[in-house]
Image (tube, grey):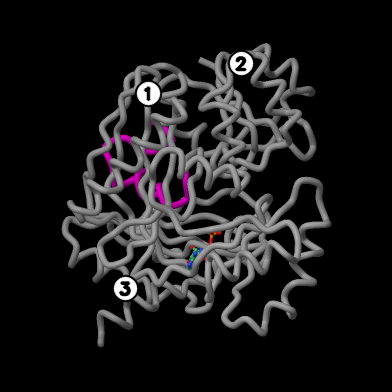
Amino acid sequence: MHVLVLGSGQLARMMSLAGAPLNIEISAFDVNSKNVVHPLTQAVIGHGLEQAIEKADVITAEFEHIPHDVLAVCERSGKFLPSTDSIKAGGDRRLEKALLDNAGVRNAKYTVINTREDFDTAIAHVGIPMVLKSALGGYDGKGQWRLKNAEDAEKIWPEMAECIAASNNQAIVAEEFVPFDREVSLVGARSKNGEVAVYPLAENVHVNGVLSLSTAIDAPELQEQAKEMFAAVANSLDYVGVLALEFFDVQGTLLVNEIAPRVHNSGHWTQQGAETCQFENHLRAVCGMPLGSTNLVRETSMINILGEDSLPESLLAMEGCHIHWYGKEKRPGRKMGHINVTADYHGELVRKLCELAEVLDPVAFPAVQEVAKQFKS
Ligand code: AMP
């Protein structure tokens, strides 16, 4: 099988690594350079999307911000999965919110802002405090504002107006501020025949809007809620592939924050912690193969490596510590790789995270330091 992935970042890279044992070959389309590249080496292996589409058995995507003309060509080939509508919904908060509402899935109250009058309507309808998010192009907390009191509306409006005017079809989604206890996510897969398999929930710690630490958790009641919401969203899209739902946990009730129609950073722990990793399951689904077991095999945490391109070698000697580099050039804050840490039981996992906190840079790995601090207090 030959799968063409739209996007040539770390997710295509990890799909390639997971696909090899099943004889699934991956090539990646870099939407910026418009080259077809090898997902591991980034070497150019083809020019032009049309030719790559022709050669592929299946086309899928590793991110949602894909130019719509590229999606249209892929759609016409009849080879694209999950579906171009799913990708578009993941890349536009207006479509995403409408999708959640139509699927009957709980999410934060919202309105859409195009004009200054809409902003007033949002303040009346959604209330303060409020979170404002650009409808298009926002990720990892980018393109967001917080409104904590009505007087600040005048202060932030010029920036919001500029954002709306900067690109065609842009708007702002105003959302009620959710006083959540924690953030969790559910990654799962839906096959061509509608079978759904979800992984255990992951608890996620974000720092400055970027995922820092993700730990698989055992929370049966939340898991049940999350699975139901996952199935509602996936079935409503007739989804095929891996899908991620990010939630706010508000005193045991889950609200969807956002969806990602693809393999997800909070599912990287499955590489060491689950029977079948998310990358393999995505490929199995889109290639029409049976899904692999999503059972947890070991307690696992994933730590993102942000803006660093080296780590103490001693980490490799630590039992259960697995480093995954993405082969990217170093830039401040950039996702450069991740560490999966596994253990036989939860206490041991926490002990290992404390051990890591001793050797990892506290600025680059704040969430691990926090775990260690809490454990010691
Ligand atoms: P997002 O880009 O929507 O994932 O938002 C980035 C982060 O901002 C989330 O992971 C939350 O920590 C926070 N956040 C987003 N929306 C809300 C909300 N409605 N209420 C409270 N916090 C939020």
> What residue appears at the point 77 percent right and 40 percent down from the top-left corner?
32
Residue 146 seen anywhere in this rendered image of the structure: yes
Look at the image and tell me in which quarter the C terminus lies: bottom left
Q: Which mark is residue 355?
A: 3
Question: Which residue is disc 2 drawn over?
Answer: 56
Q: Quadrant of residue 300?
A: bottom left
Determine whether label 1 and label 2 are within 8 Å by CB.
no
Q: Which residues are magenta?
A: 264-281
Mark 2 or mark 3, which has the lower sequence index? 2
The answer to which of 91 and 360 lies nearer the viewer is 91
Q: Position of residue 259 (x, y in %)?
A: 48, 46
Question: Mark 1 or mark 3, which is nearer to you?
Answer: 1
Determine whether label 1 and label 3 are within 8 Å by CB.
no
Mark 1 or mark 3, which has the lower sequence index? 1
What distance separates the C-alpha of mark 1 from that of mark 2?
19 Å
Q: Amino acid at mark 2?
A: Ala
Question: Is 223 colored magenta in this rendering?
Answer: no
